[in-house]
Amino acid sequence: MKIFFVTSNIGKVKEAKAFLEPLGIEIEPLKISYPEIQADSLEDVVKFGIEWLKDRIPGYFFIEDSGLFIEALNGFPGVYSAYVYKTIGLDGILKLMENVENRKAYFRSVIGYYNGNVHIFTGTVQGKISYDKRGTHGFGYDPIFVPDGYEKTFAEMTTEEKNAISHRGKALKEFHRWLKENLKY
Ligand code: ITT
Ligand code: NA
């Protein structure tokens, strides 16, 4: 089967393909920008995005909204992660975290799939903000995020290594389990 993944982020596409294509699900990226509302939750952003997109996409599709939540910053950048990444960036976050001992943070991913109805799948990974940028793989905040149980940042991991433990990998796993049960492909 083939499903559309509506996103402007090629890093997300790479991860979704690496995860789903070996399982027989073909991903067709679609770069259509949709309004991302200022909401309190990633779920609301996804649900609003689907409502806007559903009559504009010729087939089943999914979108994904994700964010980095830093404990010492009361969950910032959270739902503002994309905007913060483009503005103050990794250096800005490291600066805010200077002399902060509590490095705890988590990533969260919310996938919304539309097939006539909306289905939501989520994943979380706990970790820590590093003291400097490390690694060249991945995208976004990967060079400053060290998942619990590891010394490496996400940017020092291969796509497969990251997918095995990441927020997006977990959401994709739930999504795949649902597809398998419901579509019998
Ligand atoms: P879309 O078109 O799919 O919305 P986007 O890059 O705008 O792509 P989001 O709205 O979900 O993505 O914003 C999430 C922000 O968090 C964005 O700056 C990403 O770079 C970052 N991010 C999301 N997942 C990440 C991951 O796995 N590793 C590092 N940074 C991540
Ligand atoms: Na976005």
Image (spheres, grey):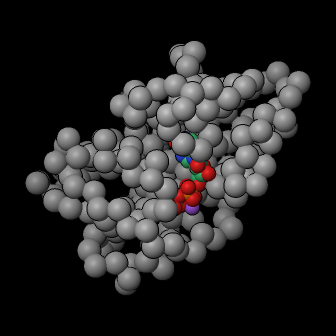
Q: Residue furthest left?
A: 185
Relative vertical location of residue 58 with respect to residue 159 in this rendering, above or below: below
Q: How many marks?
A: 0
Q: Residue furthest front?
A: 136
Q: Residue furthest bottom?
A: 55
Left of 69 or right of it: where is 160? Answer: left
**Residue 127's spot in the image, x, y percent?**
61, 27
Relative vertical location of residue 75 with respect to residue 129 in this rendering, above or below: below
**Residue 109's spot in the image, x, y percent?**
50, 48
Q: Which quadrant of the view contains residue 114?
A: bottom left
Residue nearest the observer in this picture, 44 or 77: 77
Q: Quadrant of the N terminus?
A: bottom left
Q: Which quadrant of the view contains residue 4?
A: bottom left
Relative vertical location of residue 63 with respect to residue 54 in this rendering, above or below: above
Q: Quadrant of the C terminus?
A: bottom left
Residue depicted at x 22% and y 55% = 26
Residue nearest the observer in this picture, 184 or 151: 151
Q: Is residue 103 visible?
A: yes
**Residue 19's spot in the image, x, y percent?**
30, 41
Left of 39 or right of it: where is 178? Answer: left
Residue nearest the observer in this picture, 140 or 110: 140
Q: Which quadrant of the view contains residue 39?
A: bottom right
Residue depicted at x 27% and y 46% = 20
Q: Quadrant of ligand 2?
A: bottom right
Residue nearest the observer in this picture, 161 or 54: 161
Q: Is residue 127 visible?
A: no
Residue depicted at x 38% and y 78% = 54
Left of 105 or right of it: where is 136? Answer: left
